[in-house]
Image: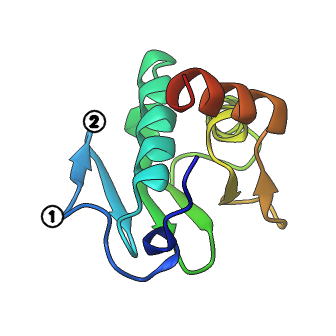
Amino acid sequence: MNYDDSFDSKQSQYTGDIGMVYGVNVLSRYNRVNELLQILNFLQKCKESGVVHYIERVFYDSQACLCEIELLSIVKTKDAVWSKIFNIAHTTISQFDFPGWQFVCHSDEVYFREFIRDNFLN
């Protein structure tokens, strides 16, 4: 695999805004492809689980390598919806900040490595 230092720059890897996905406002600081793929995978799994409409905004701060997830105010910390969305984020986003959780969370590394291998390395 060739290393391309443009992936480390502040230059966007794709042009245009992502906008809304399943009714969720999606933003990325530097529009990195790997961040978009994580967000889309996360939102797809949330849609399949029936909880995507509880998510207000997903912002991937490329500079901090951190995805910030904002939920609607009706979702209460550690209720069933909160837990379902948290668990989906835990398996789809490499590093994220989640409402009501005081620590930065990291994905299930085994799942994440398998996802990358199965979707991008073959």
Residue 37 vertical placement versus 14 (above, below): above
Q: Quadrant of residue 95?
A: bottom right
Q: Quadrant of residue 115?
A: top right
Is residue 111 visible from the viewing direction of this image?
A: yes
Q: Disc 2 designates what residue? A: 22
Q: Is residue 87 rendered to the left or right of residue 30? A: right
Circle 2: residue type: Tyr
Is residue 72 visible from the viewing direction of this image?
A: no
Q: Residue at x 71, y 25 (%)?
A: 114
Question: Of residues 23 and 106, which is closer to you in this image?
Answer: 106
Q: Secondary structure at mark 1?
A: loop
Query: How is the protein colored in the picture?
Result: rainbow
Residue 18 vertical placement versus 53 (above, below): below
Marks 2/1: CA distance? Answer: 18 Å
Q: Residue at x 51, y 36 (%)?
A: 42
Residue 92, given in percent of the width and then of the height, sits at 62, 37
Q: Disc 1 designates what residue? A: 16
Residue 66 vertical placement versus 24 (above, below): below
